[in-house]
Image (cartoon, helix red, strand yellow):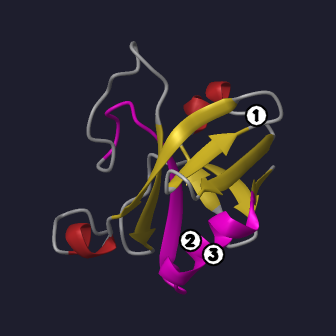
Amino acid sequence: MEIKFTEDALNKIKPKLDDHTVMLLSYADGVGPYSHHGLVALQIEFDFILITDKMDKKDYDGQYDSEPGPIYYKSYSKEFLSDNLKIAFQSNFNVLTLSDDSETIEDNLQLQDLREYYSRKVFLVS
């Protein structure tokens, strides 16, 4: 399973990556240290989160391949995802989008870089 990126989306994300970056496609359901609310009953929401390889990702037990590297997700959120995912950058709105062959899943895929903030907190794996 692979997530494809448009060239514009890659240009937006790649400069933020290094050898210690872990990418998460996070279902915003309030589960885990990086999901801040759980409005699942009201809407389906995903965020694109960057953490370090020393930070906790135990809730993210599924994996997609992608050109910039593996992207982890909560396996139970797979029911909202397909095998033909694409992340694009909409320059007119300055947002990332997540879609599959038939629909837009997330029209405002928030790019959250949590490496600096959480590296000073208790979310590090020993």
Instruction: Give, as a three-letter code, the residue at label 2.
Output: Ile
- The residue wearing badge 2 is 13
Residue drawn at the location 29% of the way across and 49% of the way down? 33
Q: Position of residue 120 (x, y in %)?
A: 17, 74
Q: Position of residue 64 (x, y in %)?
A: 71, 53
- First in residue order: circle 1 vs circle 3: 3
Quick check: marks 3 and 2 in contact, CB under 8 Å? yes
Q: CA distance from mark 3 to mark 2?
A: 6 Å
Query: In what element is the residue under mark 2?
Result: helix
* Image: magenta residue range: 5-32
Q: Which mark is residue 28?
A: none
What label does residue 82 carry, if any? 1
Q: Dot 3, crowdedness within 10 Å: few (<14), some or many (≥20)?
A: few
Q: Is residue 15 magenta?
A: yes
In this view, the residue in front, 38 or 98, is 98
For discs 3 and 2, the disc positioned in front in the rendered view: 3
The residue wearing badge 3 is 11
Q: CA distance from mark 1 to mark 3?
A: 24 Å
Residue 90 is a magenta residue: no
